[in-house]
Image (tube, grey):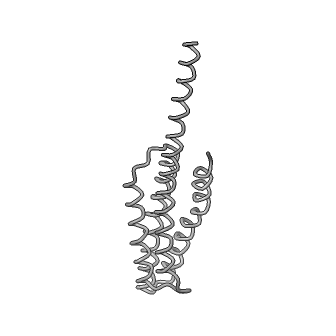
Amino acid sequence: MHNRFALLAFFGIVAFLLACGAVKKTQECNALIEKINSAQQEAEKVTSSSEPSAADMKKFADLLDKLATDIKGMDISTEELKGYATEYGEMASKTGSAARKVAEALETKDLDKANAAQKEFQGISGKEDALVDKINTFCGAP
């Protein structure tokens, strides 16, 4: 009888620890997703024009740099999510850099530079959908 109680207590503790881990994962996922969504909403305000200006692209770059810094400063202990957050932060930083190149090309009216910067910008930001899908899949999994 004593062994059965000890076994039940052990499984109860394991279940509790697993539940705590799931809660932590959910909290961390929600925080990361909220940070990304908030930045996305701000970015849409800045780049809502069909032809964003150099100033718009600079503001967009600043938002992305802030997002990358904010993500880097997050306390994420869930290893897989930490990897996704790092990847997203790096992508945001690279996209911000490309947006600055677009702004510079617009300011100098250098068409070749503008086309190259736009391709770089689209190549980097085009990877966002796949990364967001990974985050959503991971965060939606129990």
- Pick whichever, 66 or 12, lies toward us: 12
Answer with left or right where residue 41 lies relative to residue 58: right
Q: Quadrant of the C terminus?
A: top right
In the foreground, 107 or 71:
71
Which x, y percent locates residue 66? 38, 66
Q: Which residue shows up at 62% across the image and 48% down it?
A: 141
x and y percentages locating residue 54 in the rendered image: 43, 83
What residue is at 46 percent from the left and 70 percent from the top?
Answer: 98
Q: Is residue 39 above or below residue 56?
A: above
Count of labels in the image: 0
The N terminus sits in image quarter = top right
Position in image of residue 117 (x %, y %): 50, 74
- From what the image shows, is residue 83 above or below residue 99? above
- Whether 131 is drawn above or below 113: the answer is above
Name, please, the residue furthest toward the front. 1
Q: List x then y, in percent, for residue 77.
A: 44, 44
Which residue shows up at 56% across the image and 13% down it? 3
The quadrant holding residue 7 is top right
